[in-house]
Structures are given as C-alpha cells and as structure tokens.
Amino acid sequence: MGRTIAIGDIHGASRALAALLDAIQPMPDDRLIALGDYVSRGIDSAGVIERLIALRSQTQLVCLRGNHEEMMMRSRNNPAELRFWLSVGGEMALMSYAPLRMNLTLRSVPDSHWEFLDDFCVDRFETETHLFAHGGVDPELPMAAQSPAVLRWKSFGQAKPHESGKVLICGHTPQSSGLPNDKGFAICIDTGAGSGGPITALDVNARTYWQANEEKKVTTGALSFWSS
C-alpha cells in the first residue's frame, strides 16, 4: 500500500483541484480519500465531478458524500429542497452544467454524475488508524452505527475523541486560518475552497499537506507530531 491522502472540501474549485493533483502525483497504489462537498459555491462543480470520475482509474479512490451532495441529491424529487440548495451555493453548481441557459435545471446533470453520487460515493471510511467523515462522528458509536446526519453535518467544534482511539480526518467546517486544524484526536482540512480559500490534501501518516488555490498556486506544510 502506498500513501493515504485525504482531500478536503473542493466546492467547485476545479483549477485548484487540478493543481493539487499535479502536486500530489497520485500513484496506482495510493489511497485518495475525498471528504465530500465537491459541488456548490465555486464555478465548476461539473468539472470537479468529472475529474473525480476520471481519477477512479488512476488510483485507489474513496469519495465521501458531503452535505452539499446530500442537498443536491434530495433536490431531484423535492422542490423545497431544490430551492434551499440553490440558495446555499447550488445555483453555481447548476450553472456549471448549463452555463448558457437561463433556466437552470437538474436535467442538465449527466447520468454519469448521478451514478457517481448515488453508487460510487460512500458515507464514511475507516482504516486501522484513522476515521474519515465529511462532518464528524458520534464519539461513542462505531463507524458502522453512525447516522448520515452526524457524518455529514456535525461541526468540527463539537469533535471529541472517538471510543476507538483512532484519529478523525474531516472537512465541512471552514477554518478561518486557511490551514488544517489539528486537535490531536481530530484534524479538519476544510480550508475554504470555493469561497476564496485553498483546497487542502493531507498525507495522514506522514502528516504533511499540500494546498492549492484557483490561481494554481501550490504550497506545502507539515503538522507537528503530538506526544503520547
């Protein structure tokens, strides 16, 4: 097994994602875990999902569903859910599928993207040392018993050590510093992509990270090691 690399919230920032992947240079034996929120806010949600679909054949890719994917999926059969999603960034997502059309509609989303959201994406992931969720976890429940609401909507400010002793890697809660927030038992790597901040990717074992913005500027850094 190669590296295990988590990728934080992307939010339609396809140029930043391209620069990030160029810097990471994922290999076939690397495991890439995208933490969700691929859509909304940024200008190219369609391009982000298309890039992730292509990435499936290049590396060991795991994609979690974020709360914005949940809203997009619920919007298909519920006009009220659609109005809400459009008001919190979904309008930008639909514009990326139909940039020249005034009447934005979910019918513009190709079947391959719905298949990605419905069938390829998962709610959670776990390794021998780490837990991966978009938002958070209930600290007293095993991963298999976690509710989708907690996994996708819980904020990082509510994070507590998990009963397994494993470290949680999550997104969902933008960090105003623009840097990963490491509490020791939990690390948040949502650094505001789609709203002016960079995308962050973390090598969870080496504890090094890459960041890329929409101008394709890439920077690197490292988390300190916590003493036991």
Image: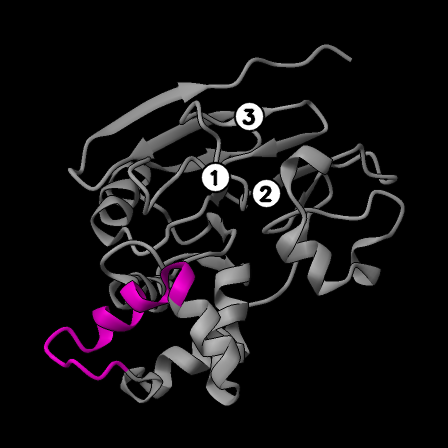
Tell me the CA gap for discs 1 and 3: 9 Å
Tag 1: residue type? Answer: Asp
Above or below for 40 versus 97: above
Q: Main secondary structure of the magenta part?
A: helix
Amino acid type for the residue under numbered disc 2:
Cys
Q: What residue does disc 3 label?
A: 181
The C terminus: image quadrant = top right
Mark 3 residue element: strand
Is residue 92 highlighted in magenta?
yes
Residue at image position (54%, 63%) is: 65
Q: Is residue 216 above or below residue 17?
A: above
Residue lying at 28% horizontally and 38% vertically, measured from the top left: 196
Range of magenta residues: 87-104
* Picture residue at 31% right of the left edge, 68% below the top: 91
- Going by the numbered disc 3, the residue's amino acid type is Asn
* Other residues around mark 3 within 10 Å, as few (<14) / some (14–19) / many (≥20): some
The residue at which mark 1 appears reads as: 190
Rendering coords of residue 134 (x, y %): 58, 51
Q: Secondary structure at mark 1?
A: loop
Counting from the top left corner in percent of width and height, residue 9 is at: 44, 47
The residue singled out by tag 2 in the image is 170
Query: What percent of the width, then of the height, locates residue 173?
Result: 54, 40
- Height in image: 83 above or below 130? below
- For marks 2 and 3 on the same chain, the one whose residue lies earlier in the sequence: 2
Q: Earlier in the sequence, mark 1 or mark 3?
A: 3
Q: Is 178 left, or right, of 182 in this rendering?
A: left
Residue at screen point 30% across, 61% down: 48
